[in-house]
C-alpha cells in the first residue's frame, strides 16, 4: 500500500511517500502503526484531529476500513481562498 504525505506532514516525516505492508484494518489502526514506526511519525500524527485522510482519492475518516485500498493520503485540513 502506498502512503502519501502532504504539507507539514511531509515535512515532519521527511518523505512524501512510503510503501508499506500493514495488518491494520482501519485508518486509525494504520495511524497507530505509523506512529510507532518513528519519532517523526509520532510527531506528525500527535494531533489526529488536525489530519485529514483520503482513501484511493476519496475523502474518508479514521474509522474507515482500509481493506483493498491501494493508496492512502494524509494532509492537513484545507481552507478556501
Image (spheres, rainbow, N blue to C red):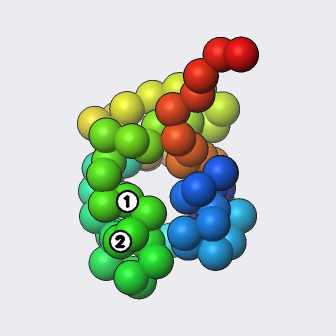
Q: Quadrant of residue 17?
A: bottom right
Residue located beneath label 2 in the image: 42
Q: Position of residue 69 (x, y in %)?
A: 55, 44
Location of mark 1 (residue): 45
| Residue situated in front as seen by the camera: 67 or 32 | 32
Res. 32 visible in picture: yes
Residue 19 at least partly seen = no
Q: Is residue 73 above or below residue 33?
A: above
Q: Kindly report the distance in space between the C-alpha atoms of the residues bearing marks 1 and 2.
A: 5 Å
x and y percentages locating residue 3 in the rendered image: 60, 58
Task: Please state, as top left, top right, bottom left or bottom right, where the C terminus lies in the image.
Answer: top right
Residue 35's x, y, as percent? 34, 71
Please, which residue is most extreme toward the top here? Answer: 81
The answer to whether 2 is drawn above or below residue 81 in the figure is: below
**Residue, far front:** 81
Residue at 56%, 44% (x, y): give it.
Answer: 75
Q: Locate the N terminus by quadrant.
A: bottom right
Amino acid at each position: 500500500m502506498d502512503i502519501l504525505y502532504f504539507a507539514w506532514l511531509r515535512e515532519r516525516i521527511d518523505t512524501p511517500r512510503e510503501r508499506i505492508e500493514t495488518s491494520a484494518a482501519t485508518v486509525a489502526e494504520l495511524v497507530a502503526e505509523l506512529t510507532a514506526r518513528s519519532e517523526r511519525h509520532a510527531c506528525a500524527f500527535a494531533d489526529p484531529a488536525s489530519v485529514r485522510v483520503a482513501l484511493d482519492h476519496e475523502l474518508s475518516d479514521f474509522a474507515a476500513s482500509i481493506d483493498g485500498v491501494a493508496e492512502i493520503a494524509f494532509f492537513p485540513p484545507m481552507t478556501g481562498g
